[in-house]
Amino acid sequence: MTERSASAGAAAALAGLACAEVVAAGPNLPSLADGVARTIVDTAPRSVVDLAVGLLGQRDKPAVRLAVTGGVAAAGAATGLGSPRRATAAAVGAAALAAAVTVHRDRRQPAGTVAVAALGAATTALALRALRRSPARTTRTTRAAVAVASLAALAAARAIRARRRRRHDALTAGHRPPDTGVAAPQPAPAAAATDGAEQWGVATPLFTPVENLYAADVNLDPPLLDARQWRLEVTGLVERPRSFDLAELTALGTVDFDALLVCIHNGPGDDRLGNLRWTGVPLARLLSAVRPAPHARTVVTRAFDGFDMSLPLTLLEELDGYLVTGVAGRPLPALHGYPARIMVPGIYGQYNGVKWVTQLHLTDRPPADYWPRRGWPADPVRVRLMSRIDPPPAASADAPVTLTGVAWAPPSGVAAVEVAVDHGPWHPTELAAELAPAAWRRWRVRLDLPAGRHVVRSRVTAATGEMQDERRRPPFPSGASGYHEVNINVAEDGGRSGA
């Protein structure tokens, strides 16, 4: 009986969660599962979050959702052991808690969120009662069927949201002024688009495809905002507080710029970064339109959901910042901040500025932002210069081996890249044309390597003379460091493999 009750409770809890998620997905209400998952991420120890990111990479969000689903099933199994009255009370309490944390994070439709939570609780209670009353000979099959159907419904809800996001991106990609004010970036000149390195067989493209750009934020599902209703409020210590729509912002003048976006968790050889051509309004131009007060010190960038990130005005005097409205010749995808985000090339992504920005608030003191509350430094962390080696192509032992890669050293740019084999002397490489100091730069070198196993590492020197740090350090607190190394096996018969 105990086993029957526990499995019935687990199946009923999954049924309630599935019902809530499917109903919410239809009218695009906030997801209760995502609300709970985000709260878990926000409250988990930083070391646990860093470990998860290191192990899971960009699969961290699906993993968190899976953990929430498993937690719901486990909680349901535990409550299923109690009396029907207690199980119902537990379902109502869990639904109320899920609704509260979701509304706290996403205030778009609180009444709808509460209604969805109530429906989930009712479904759980009814399913538990029905499963407990089913005949013993059919109970196991019924419970399994309910659990499988619930998991399929959860997958369907995720598919509905993903399809809506794709449709949203497809529709917004065609928007142009005066409908939304999003200016189309001008295509790059042919010389700048290729940088003369295509003939090298470089594995890393000059521009990262937008669909391959990493996404790291505290929202498990991107909000789908309507640019025609969107406004940017500029408030605080300014002489002329203003509210801009996209047409008014782009009327200030947009520019195209090439820059790297790097996650602070990106380690040697990792791919939590991307090099793209962005379109946006320079923040200096935007701020001059509102005239900051002399005693203003900080710009608080605020997203639609209340997420804050602060930028010192002294930093913006040194580095160029932008209100970005487009990337790769089209408006931003929802995943990357549509209709606008803040970006300051040269600092790590988590300090770069918020996506889905709705407010710039100028103040004379920095507030307590999300990342400092999580233990990270309060001041924005600069991107560490680093070089990465592409997977080497096949080559024979009796012919030169061509190694290629990319390196970055924002904001000054890359001055030199060197490689060393088996901890031997450093060899200079040939650099492709510089796209922009804040972008990555491709390199290549031809080396004569004997047959056998070799270790190749690379390093970069910035235009300022700063050299890449070879010490291996974790991302916390100032970004990962260390040389990227690859193992290469060169065979006598021309066979070759690299790892």
Image (spheres, rainbow, N blue to C red):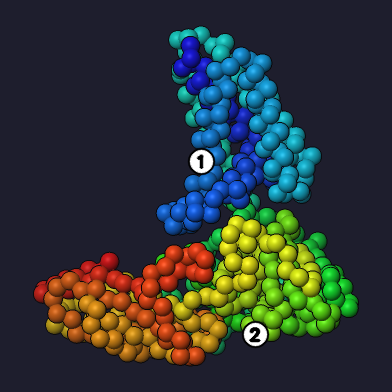
Q: Can you tell which quarter of the image residue 19 is in?
A: top right
> Residue at 63% of width from left, 37% of height from top?
22
Circles 2 and 1, Cβ within 8 Å, touching? The answer is: no
Query: What's under tag 2, amino acid-wise?
Result: Glu
Q: In the rendered view, does 185 fall on the left or right side of 210?
A: right
Q: In the rendered view, does 353 fall on the left or right side of 287?
A: left
Relative vertical location of residue 251 with respect to residue 223 in this rendering, above or below: below
Residue beneath disc 2: 318
Relative vertical location of residue 170 with respect to residue 160 in this rendering, above or below: below
**Front position among marks 2 and 1:** 2
> Residue at 58% of width from left, 63% of height from top?
376
Residue 147 screen position, x and y as percent: 51, 28
**Quick one: which residue is furthest to the left in this view?**
492
Residue 36 screen position, x and y as percent: 62, 42
Residue 199 screen position, x and y as percent: 36, 84
> Residue at 31% of width from left, 77% of height from top?
457
Which labelled disc corresponds to residue 67?
1
Q: Quadrant of the C terminus?
A: bottom left
Question: Disc 2 or 1, which lies upstream in sequence?
Answer: 1
> Residue at 53% of width from left, 54% of height from top?
46
